[in-house]
Image (tube, coloured by chain):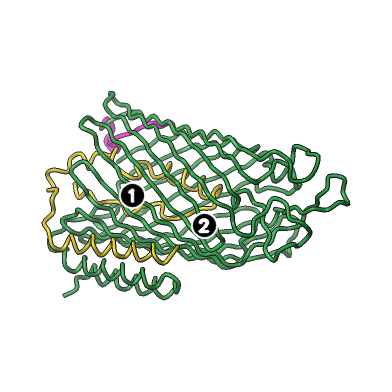
Chain colours: A green, B yellow
Amino acid sequence: MVPPAARVVVAAATEVAEGASSMRFPIIVVTGLMVVASAGLTAVSEAAVLPEERIDVMYHYYDGGGITVEGPSVLVRKQFGESFSVQGKYHVDTISGASIDVITTASPYREERTEIAGTVDYLRGDTLLSFGVVRSDENDYKGRSFNIGVSQEVFAAMTTLSMGYVRGSDEIGRTGEPDFLEELDRHSWRLGVTQVVTRNMLAELSFETITDKGFLNNPYRQVRYLDPEPGRGYSFQPEVYPRRRTSNAVALRTRYHLPYRAAVHAEYRYFSDDWGIDAHAARIGYTHATLPRLILDIQYRYYTQGAADFWSDLYPFRSAQNFLARDKELSRYDSHAVRLGVSYDLLRSRMAFIERGTVNFVYDWITADYRDFRDLRVSAESPGEEPTYSLSANVFQLYFSFWF
Amino acid sequence: MPLRLQRTLVVAAVCMIAGCAGIEPWVQPYERDRLADPIMSFERDPVSAAYLQKLYDIREGARGATGGAGGGCGCN
């Protein structure tokens, strides 16, 4: 007999499989394996748990590439009874300054983004079901999405299988042009396996495929092409992206607890899409928790990607291709990031309704070296000989966390 | 993603789950104290993890597979 948990997985899997024709084979097979595992192994599994009750209040600050982004972020998770947990999130990005794109093409930039999200988790036996909605608003961009997920502990809770689906519907406008309105639909399917490897080691394998359909451009960004008319030797025209994109990513993460209270972690992710972008991301880190009340984190991340097939820093003439892009995010580049984090225990059980509290400070230093995207703030003898652009960013997070 | 990689993933999942079905759990619940330590969490502070993930997503061409399966410890 198939247990209730497995039937839930079947229902979710059917919806997933109907939407992703290109990924139908692996999704159905892996989902089937999850069902078999759920049916056969729940007898030896242990109870899953709801997300912990906590409040996080954060101030974040990003300074890099000529812009600053800052604002608050608040997350609240609260349980109701033995089976339900509700999560609410409020996040604001206030943007100021002028990026390299604004400076070189005089395009406007977004000023503020507000995100509100809510999630409900339902626990039944070894199965955790979740449903969430996200609403994101800017003056020229509205994002709406919902997500559903299910995770199942099996094999005496040594293995956690999970799958999720996200559907997003965005509306894109352009400041100063009230008649400009474009739409973007997004579907995302996720599969994950978390495994207890040894009494000191955890591993997680994740897979996600995302499909987009609609307006994928940035409505303000321009591409440049050779044009002898202006004295500088080139002109600009609006970029043109394909209206579809499908991407796949697979990642493996591990964490290992050392003989003393510390942990090392490593991660690798491979990404590929049908625009021709391949990317690799690798991360290693160390967490040290032997000092009284202090947890220290240090981490290094490396990222490299190739360019989209239709990308060019300088096209030979106007409308040289059916698709045109000069976004540096779609170009060939490498990035390095170093993180330092400190978490300090403020209190433990000193108040009746709060079990624990921490204050946390995290600093990230990120650099990006673009291989083909050229810095047009620097003039050159002829177009295409400008130096390539590089970026350095400082990212700060200060947040308080309370568990209750 | 190349078809070969997709097949490899499926085969890996088959082996993982088939393997689980035939053998006993090798880490007992009472042996998972270290795995239950918060420093072993893949997402220790969700508000920070979400912020940093968003920061990378909007500045990089790659996206997805950012984890979130959670659990796996069975310590509670």
Q: Where A175 sits versus A400, above or below?
A: below
Q: Where A116 sits versus A55, above or below?
A: below
Q: Circle 1 is placed at which residue position?
A: A78
Depth check, front residue: B15 or A355: B15
Disc 1 marks a residue whose amino acid type is: Lys
Q: Earlier in the sequence, mark 1 or mark 2?
A: 1
Q: In the shown orientation, is residue A311 left or right of residue A399?
A: right
* Bounds of the magenta segment: A349-361
Q: Nearer the viewer, mark 1 or mark 2?
A: 2
Magenta region, mostly helix, strand or loop?
Answer: strand
Looking at the picture, how far across and down is residue B70, in whole percent? Answer: 30, 51
Q: Where A279 sits versus B35, above or below?
A: below
Disc 2 marks a residue whose amino acid type is: Arg
Label 2 resides on the chain identified as A
Q: Which mark is residue A352?
A: none
Q: Is residue A299 magenta?
A: no
Label 1 resides on the chain identified as A
**Label 2 element class:** strand
User: What residue is drawn where x is 69% and y is 46%?
Assistant: A101
Q: Circle 2 is placed at which residue position?
A: A135
Q: Residues within 10 Å of mark 1 (few under 14, many from 20)?
A: some
Looking at the picture, how far across and down is residue B44, in whole percent? Answer: 34, 41
Depth check, front residue: A319 or A393: A319
